[in-house]
């Protein structure tokens, strides 16, 4: 029986893709490289720390990982309030299920990203009494550490938790944690491979307490 629902942040609860894409693009430009949208496969769902590592390896400058990370984070901070918005239906879904389930937010992003989102969207802080950031665990997605820590903080067994995710790495992490998972399909033309999810939906508006209870 599902007792808790754990939400991913980027691409699930908030739409931050354009902010992160532009952040990586600007950082890459500083290093003399081009960041094209096909490189999203190296950054989607893994957090900025692993993204910086993946991209600098791709560009052939792995020793520049720290400098790239600092640039990308600064760029994101500058773009955050302009570009990041709530995902359609996010607050409505939280309102629908809050009476029945414990709620947590679990992200591969560092804590400053979660803090910024709670400041911009204070309603999220009201619903998410528990949150986990990527710099609070040894391994980020696709490892299950983030979700397992969220379950411990919620005081709910992993098998009684449901994860809502939009990325293949996030779905993989949820299943590795022994949790059920609803995969949120990308609205764009490049669909993410999230077939491993127990259920796929096109929008958060399609998720109900009834659907959750069926998993």
Image: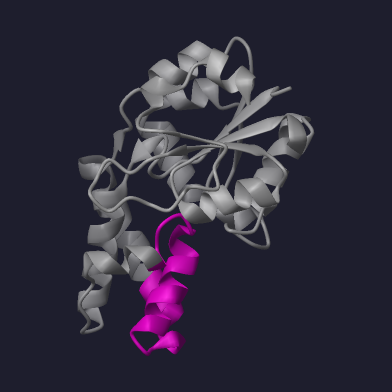
The answer to whether residue 115 is above or below residue 19 is: above
User: Is residue 44 shown to the viewer in this render?
Assistant: yes
Magenta-colored stretch includes residue 86: no
Residue 11 is left or right of residue 47, and the answer is left
Magenta-highlighted residues: 42-69
The answer to whether residue 65 is above or below residue 108 is: below
Q: Residue at x 33, y 63 (%)?
A: 40
Residue 210: quarter of image: top right
Q: Residue at x 58, y 58 (%)?
A: 142
Q: Nearer the viewer, residue 195 or 166?
A: 195
Q: Which quarter of the image is occupied by the C terminus?
A: top right
Here the colouring is: one colour
SS majority, magenta: helix
Magenta-colored stretch includes residue 57: yes
Q: How many marks?
A: 0
Q: Which quarter of the image is occupied by the N terminus?
A: top right
Q: Nearer the viewer, residue 108 or 197?
A: 197
Give the image location of residue 117, x and y in percent.
Answer: 40, 37
Give the image location of residue 126, x and y in percent.
Answer: 51, 20
Q: Residue at x 35, y 32 (%)?
A: 202
The answer to whether residue 95 is above or below residue 70 is: above
Give the image location of residue 21, x and y in percent.
Answer: 26, 59
User: Is residue 109 shown to the viewer in this render?
Assistant: no
Q: Residue at x 49, y 59 (%)?
A: 46
Give the image location of residue 102, x and y in percent.
Answer: 65, 22
């Amino acid at each position: 029986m599902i007792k808790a629902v754990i939400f991913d942040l980027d691409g699930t609860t908030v739409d931050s893709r354009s902010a992160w894409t532009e952040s990586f693009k600007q950082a890459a430009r500083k290093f003399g490289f081009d960041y094209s949208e096909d490189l999203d496969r190296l950054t989607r769902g893994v957090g900025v720390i692993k993204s910086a590592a993946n991209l600098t390896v791709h560009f052939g400058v792995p020793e520049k990982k720290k400098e790239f990370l600092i640039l990308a984070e600064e760029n994101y901070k500058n773009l955050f309030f302009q570009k990041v918005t709530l995902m359609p239906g996010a607050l409505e879904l939280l309102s629908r299920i809050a009476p029945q389930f414990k709620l947590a937010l679990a992200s591969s992003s560092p804590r400053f990203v979660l803090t910024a989102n709670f400041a911009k969207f204070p309603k999220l802080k009201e619903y998410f009494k528990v949150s986990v950031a990527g710099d609070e665990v040894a391994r980020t997605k696709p490892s299950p550490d983030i979700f397992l820590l969220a379950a411990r903080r919620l005081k709910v067994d992993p098998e009684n938790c449901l994860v809502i995710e939009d990325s293949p790495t996030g779905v993989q992490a949820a299943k590795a944690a022994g949790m059920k998972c609803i995969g949120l399909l990308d609205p764009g033309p490049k669909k993410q491979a999230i077939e491993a999810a127990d259920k796929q939906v096109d929008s958060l508006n399609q998720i109900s307490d009834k659907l959750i209870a069926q998993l």
